[in-house]
Amino acid sequence: MTFTSKALLVAAALPLALADDWAPTAADYAAWDQNWNMCKYTAWTWAAIAAVMMIYRWTTVLLHHIRRIANLNHGTSSDSKQKYFTIPDERWASFKRHFIVAPLLRKRHNREFKLSAAMNVGTLPSRAQSFILVGYFAMNAVTCAMHINWQGDKATWLGDVCDRTGTLAVLNMIPLFVLAGRNNPLIWLLGISFDTYNLIHRWIGRICVFEAILHGAFWMAKQVTEDPTKGWNNITTYMGSSTTILAGTIGVCAFIVILLQSPSIIRHAFYETFLHIHILLVITTLVVLWMHLEGLPHQKQLLLPVILCWAIERSARLYSLVRRNIGRGVTKAEVEALPGDAVRVTLRIANPWKFKPGQHVYMYMPSVGLWTSHPFTLAWSQEIDSLGGEKNLPTARQDILGKKTASMSLIIRRRTGFTDRMFSKAERTPGGKFMTTAYVEGPYGNQSFQSYGTVMLFAAGVGITHQVPHVRDLVAAYANGTCATRKVTLVWIIQSPEHLEWIRPWMTQILGMEKRRDILKILLFITRPRSTKEIHSPSSSVQMFPGKPDVGALMDKEQSQQVGAMAVSCCGTGSLSDDLRKAMRARCEKTEIDFFEEAFSW
């Protein structure tokens, strides 16, 4: 190994560089060599896991494509061919039930723990997520302690552990920053949701903080051990006279503040404040860590991928904002207050894109919140002459997805902060709507269920925004004969019939689409009707019921008549998601069923 390779991993060994006459010894080189090995082991582990997941991801994509192509034709004979895809593989179905989609314990996963309506403590990770997190913790614990001569001189092994923990703290910042980005390429490459990456990002961050604290603690312990009479005085002297040590101390303090503000109860209660402070602390950490490595140019190379990743990701966001919102004019938004504490935001994008189901954007609205952006699912898209004049919507899939659209719409439920200010402003405006300048960043994500013969779409409240695009896409694709889907069931759970106004104009267009009756069934559940008169079913394909649905019974009914593989999608409350997961796990070994849940977590 060259000196440069060894020196790259001395980023945590800065106390040694404080003395002008210090020169590395053979023991120092050996310690650096072990640190380098630990980094290589960690990197190869990352690569191996990513390779396995990438193979699984793209094999699944290929199989779904083959399944879709094999079942394009309509008719009873064609539907009978999908019988093959209804039968699950026993071992895979069991693995899926007990690991991939399983909650950590019995049932609870996405249902939040709450101290009150405004105090969200968080959720439990799934069994698969827990396996990843525990494995990552274990790997870091082993690499921190491996090949340390614990029986040797105390000051020596204290210095070695100091070096090792500092090295791993910097190394872990690479995946920490990669997973934090909205433009994370691994989302597409590995097929893992941003929600899961966000969870892993938070826990890797906690590991970084813990290792940084250990790095500082072992360095101080080493100073005291080497000279018990002057050790603590040496520490204060270093902090007062050494920019390197002072910068490192500030960095550790910034890490600790990030850790203290990271619990879910703080993030959710003060999200906008949390986000701004978080970004400032991250910038502070990068700056002082760079100063912490002053005079050690080779060591700084370990930090360069972190800074480069952050800079590229932020530049990609800026590029998206400029590209989408500046052209022939700028992006405009019409914000309309709706019954049930919601707003409909119709965006006329300056430079629109090809709309696909499952996309979401980050929206900035300076007149409502100057420095804030929030993620919202795109519920609808269509061409318009102006924000007030809509063209007739073609129902053919190639017309829906093949043309660039001029407007895109969101349904946003009133909460606190940004959404409350937006709703209040619309409500105060004459006519219940206002026009303003907006900026959108994205789009991010997309999803298709066209390879599934049977699709069940569950939504609660504003979660309908995720499912409406899928309904339109599947009905249009069925009419064109370009999907394997033969049955689509939309289940929407709302508190009041007035919530139907959120999507009424869009649903009217869907109900008028070609061959809609052959494929689509809509079940509406009203949990808090004012009277029984509000509950009435317009037709056999659009039915309304009081109360909450028995999701297991609904799934049983569809499973008994299942055509091909079944997709069960959920976008709603955590309790609904957990109920559906439980029902799916109880049935996935009988027929082929895949479960998809859409949830934003911060």
Image (tube, helix red, strand yellow):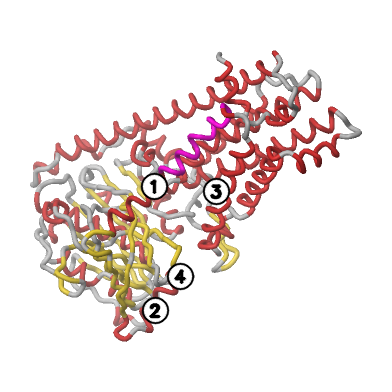
Horizontal relation, residue 309 to residue 79: left or right = right
Q: Kindly report which numbered mark, 4 or 3, lies closer to the viewer in this rendering.
A: 3
User: Which residue corresponds to the image point at 23% horizontal and 49% vertical from the top-left?
Assistant: 454
SS for dot 2? helix
SS for dot 4? loop
**Residue 455's spot in the image, x, y percent?**
25, 51
Query: Which badge, 2 or 3, is on the more N-terminal residue?
Result: 3
User: Which residue corresponds to the image point at 58% horizontal and 35% vertical from the top-left?
Assistant: 170
Q: Is residue 113 visible?
A: no
The residue labelled by disc 4 is: 415
SS for dot 3? helix
The residue labelled by disc 3 is: 283
**Residue 108's spot in the image, x, y percent?**
50, 52
**Residue 533's spot in the image, x, y percent?**
29, 82
**Residue 92's spot in the image, x, y percent?**
36, 33
The residue labelled by disc 1 is: 315
Report the magenta residues as a range: 298-312
Q: Is residue 251 visible?
A: yes
Query: Which badge, 1 or 4, is on the more N-terminal residue?
Result: 1
Q: Quadrant of residue 33?
A: top right
Q: Nearer the viewer, residue 340 or 577?
A: 340
